[in-house]
Image: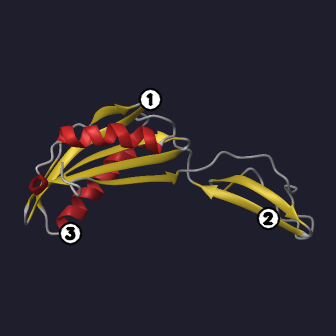
Amino acid sequence: MSKAWLAFLALCWVGAAAAQPLAAPPTHPGTKLNFPQTLAGATMQGSAVNGATFSYRYIAGRRVPAGSNSPVVTSEFSAEMAEAEQQARGAGMSGFEKPAVPGTCSYGAIAFRCTVYSASAGNGRVYGKFMLTGYRDSYLKIIAEWTQADSATLADADKALAAFVPALLQ
């Protein structure tokens, strides 16, 4: 197996965090500003008092449900795949191909919404396995990529992912 045949990209980003108990009062004593648990679609993540300083932290967005089948994950998956196709075209690739319907793949106890895609580049086809799930209130996105020139296969990628994903989630 080529040493450079497979590249991994693992991203975890927060959709939103759950509200936590307040340490500062809901109304700032000096300014009389109100800081409720939700404000204009944002959820209070926390607050603190440090001497005479009060701080209030809000997160806009929503919590990402665990797993691969929620409407939130399904929608994000579709948007990410559309962006991947657009980026491939922007990089000069052509013939972007993916199945009409994504599948589900599991590594360890984690199930992902996943698909395998490919596009033509100057030196043959580039392949990728794109996986997305909800994990600890966040999106977890993993992409494994390989090229036709490396003589790697989907089976090689799956073998590498079977070791990589559980190690990532320890």
Q: Is residue 152 left or right of residue 77?
A: left
Q: Residue at x 52, y 43 (%)?
A: 64
Describe the element under mark 2 as helix, strand or loop.
strand
Tag 1: residue type?
A: Ala
How far across and how far down the image is residue 124, in percent? 7, 59
Mark 3 touches mark 2? (CB < 8 Å): no
Q: Which mark is residue 90?
A: 3
Q: Residue at x 31, y 50 (%)?
A: 143
- Disc 3 versus disc 1: nearer the observer: 1
How far across and how far down the image is residue 120, in percent? 9, 58
Q: Is residue 12 left or right of residue 161?
A: right
Q: Which mark is residue 81?
A: none
Is disc 1 surrounded by few (<14), some (14 to 19) or many (20+) residues within 10 Å? few
Is disc 3 surrounded by few (<14), some (14 to 19) or many (20+) residues within 10 Å? few
Q: Is residue 159 left or right of residue 151?
A: right
Q: Which mark is residue 109?
A: 1
Tag 2: residue type?
A: Ser
Outermost residue toward the top in this view:
109
Q: Which residue is mark 2?
A: 55
Residues at marks 2 and 1, CA–CA distance in whole angstroms: 39 Å
Q: Residue at x 41, y 31 (%)?
A: 108
Front residue of 44/152: it is 152
Residues at marks 3 and 1, CA–CA distance in whole angstroms: 36 Å
- Mark nearer the N terminus (3 vs 1): 3
Asked whether residue 98 appears in the rendered view, the answer is: yes
